[in-house]
Image (cartoon, rainbow, N blue to C red):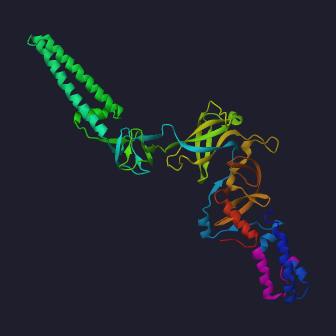
Amino acid sequence: MKIRALLLSGVAVSLLLGCPKKEEHAEGDGHEHAQEKKPQAGTGTEGKKEGEEHEGEHGEEGHGEEGGHEEVIQLTPEALRSAELKTEEARRKPLVMGLSVPARVAFTQDGVAQVAARVPGRLASIEVQLGQRVKKDQVLGYLESPELGQARADYLSAATKAGVAEENFRREKELLAKGISSEREMREAESAFVTAQAERNAADGRLHALGLADAEITALRNNEHYSSRFPARSPLEGTVVEVLGTVGQAVEGTTHLFTVGDLSRLWVLLDVSETQLAAVKQGQPVSITVPALPERRFEGKVEYVGAVVSERTRTIPVRVAVPNQDGTLKPGMFATAEVATTTATTASDAGEVPSGRVVVPREAVQKVGAESVVFVPAGEGRFKPVEVKLGESSAREVELLSGIEPGTQIVTQGAFILKSELSKESMGEGHSH
């Protein structure tokens, strides 16, 4: 392997510089001694030590050209723990080519709700904290609304009058049937009842206009309580992502007080160029990465492909649904989406099929000089760089045409750290632990 070919000249210079020193301590031709790289009889302890130093520090480099030794990186247990290396098995599989598109993370259409005051008044209390998980219909805060209190009082009064008028009308009908009351009195009672019903319905409509639901109005009628206190409730289960109100704030019915969002399932929104649209279809798998979490990949599927091309940008909106049960993704994040479009079919050798290729993650392949290498575990804390020949690649994976057999364990996460250690050694610093 030629990973350290540039070091050979440096090693040769070191050996030549050592020759005069050996001539002082040994009889005979010192240059032959340097070229053969072994101590002559009678060179003494110093010559032996120098030979051992050349062997220990430059043995692999000096013989790398002739293939005498393999290069190995050694990490101490402390360095190994700090590196947090991960390995993965190299596998034969088709390489899935992808379309890489900038994207952004957003709430789903039914996964976010803005909670408004609904009634004019004052924000009396806030019952939740930012980031708190809430249930559907859970109270987020309370408002004090004199207008609502008056509307409730009017409704209770109208409801009471309607109840009395209804009972009077029923009694007058019974009396008329017995011949005790006149029809005129029965008609008057009927008219009073209809009027009371209309007033109650008007009061009911007023409460609905102020934001009360039927269940709240029914409870109000049963409890006969006309407090001016009004709850602002969450319309869905989720997380409180915004608290915009402050206690004591004067609000209108449309004032936005809270935002509740469901983070368990999000959308990733793509703008695909019209020239790339033919490669995107509903149901295709999509891999999502975000700069804030470079070590994570999130998988989703194309849920919707837009029907209209933007005249300004010449792009089509594409929507990807992504599970997010742990809440790692955040709405508003920028992302890169790779849409799996086709499987690579080209091959450098005629007749080769994609299923016969070894495929590894891109992060496993590191560039060392002009060569591409992967790192293979070679014992406790030891890793061997192996030169590989690359084939087709996608945003996530790369094909290996030679160098690694299927089933071989290779370093994926942390391969760059091993490359850095290899570079330090190549600069003459030895293994950095």
* Residue at image location 82% in from the left, 42% down from the top: 350
* Residue at image location 10% in from the left, 13% down from the top: 181
134 or 90, nearer to the observer: 134
The quadrant in which residue 223 appears is top left
Q: Quadrant of the N terminus?
A: bottom right
Spot occupied by residue 413 in the image (x, y as percentages of width and height)? 63, 57
Spot occupied by residue 81 in the image (x, y as percentages of width and height)? 59, 66
Spot occupied by residue 259 in the image (x, y as percentages of width and height)? 45, 44
Question: Is residue 133 in view from this perspective?
Answer: yes
40 or 148, nearer to the observer: 148
**359 sits left or right of 225 in the view:** right
44 part of magenta stretch: yes
The quadrant in which residue 209 appears is top left
Q: Considering only vertical position in the picture, is 285 above or below 162?
A: below
Point out the stretch of residues depicted in magenta.
Answer: 35-57
The quadrant in which residue 167 appears is top left
**209 sits left or right of 241 in the view:** left
Q: Quadrant of the C terminus?
A: bottom right
19 part of magenta stretch: no
